[in-house]
Amino acid sequence: ILLGLVLLFSVIALIISHYMSKKAMFPITYAFSRQQEFTADASHELRTPLSVMLSSINALELVIDLEEDSYEKKIILGMKKEVKRMTGLVSDLLTLARSGSDAIELNKETFDLQPIVEEVINSVCPLAEAKEINLHYDTPKQLILTGDSQRLTQLLYILLDNAIKYNRSGGETSLSLSIRDKELWVTVKDTGIGIDPAYYNRIFERFYRADQARSRELGGYGLGLSIAKWIVESHDGTIQVKSELDKGSTFIVRLPIQ
Ligand code: ADP
């Protein structure tokens, strides 16, 4: 019995000391992981009420048949836009909060990226058209690589969305993919407002926006590029930016091909 009790106490003492040492030795990491956990839980919980709100607004829009430029219609459309924006923010927060832990498992497979590029181009086309931006793309007929196709699709969206959002009306946006020395090069170029070199590193930080006012007005929260960086790095790649104020920016992603 005595031996059993000693063993039990040792195990309890070990668990307590493990917990305490984690908190005492790595207070920042510990606080950070608690914060990440909280952000992940909170964003997860926020998703349900937001999707309920969005379906209620959609239902309301159908039930009350309002005239296109009536005041009420504008209010409903405004609500819908904000709920969608918030849904995007919540989903970005969830991705980022989980990205530092083991909670997100990359779903790596071998696939052809070429048809995905076409899909992404088709979906961002209306955004480009609305700003009268010339959108070009150039990709080999087949782009077989190993990676998480969903995350790599998200990466293309983020870069193209920015290259349209921060462009001027009538400008150019191009996406080019090529294989060089066992690496996939993804280049997204625009002729937009550009980025001050002083902010090159900061734009990849969470919630950082180089031009607060403009970015907010365009609907950004400053999370896209931190998600892009996480996606690239979790595929052992690199992301770089070159830019000139008032002339445009080029984002270059290099991913090793296995
Ligand atoms: P946001 O949601 O604000 O666009 P991102 O993380 O995607 O967030 O980008 C961070 C900031 O980097 C943006 O607010 C903007 O100031 C700047 N930025 C990103 N892409 C471009 C671009 N193609 N041209 C000019 N500025 C850009």
Image (cartoon, grey):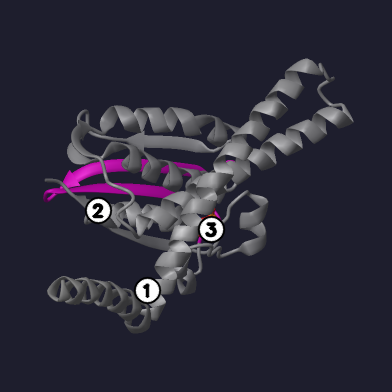
Whether the residue carrying mark 3 lies under 8 Å from ligand 1 is answered with yes
Residue 29, labelled with which disc?
1
In the image, residue 24 sits, relative to residue 232, either above or below, namely: below
SS assignment for the magenta stretch, majority: strand
Mark 3, residue position: 222
Q: Is residue 174 magenta?
A: yes
| SS state under label 1 | helix
Measure how far apart labels 2 and 1 are at the Cα level: 30 Å
Q: Residue at x 81, y 16 (%)?
A: 65
- Say whether residue 216 is visible: yes
Disc nearest the viewer among 2 and 3: 3
Give the left or right position of residue 240, taking residue 52 as reference: left
Give the left or right position of residue 21, taking residue 121 as reference: left
Q: Residue at x 24, y 52 (%)?
A: 235
In the image, residue 226 sits, relative to residue 123, either above or below, namely: below
Measure how far apart labels 2 and 3 are at the Cα level: 22 Å
> Which of the two discs, 2 and 3, labels the residue nearer the N terminus?
3
Between 208 and 121, the one lying in front of the other is: 208
Mark 2 residue type: Arg
The picture quadrant where one finds residue 51 is top right
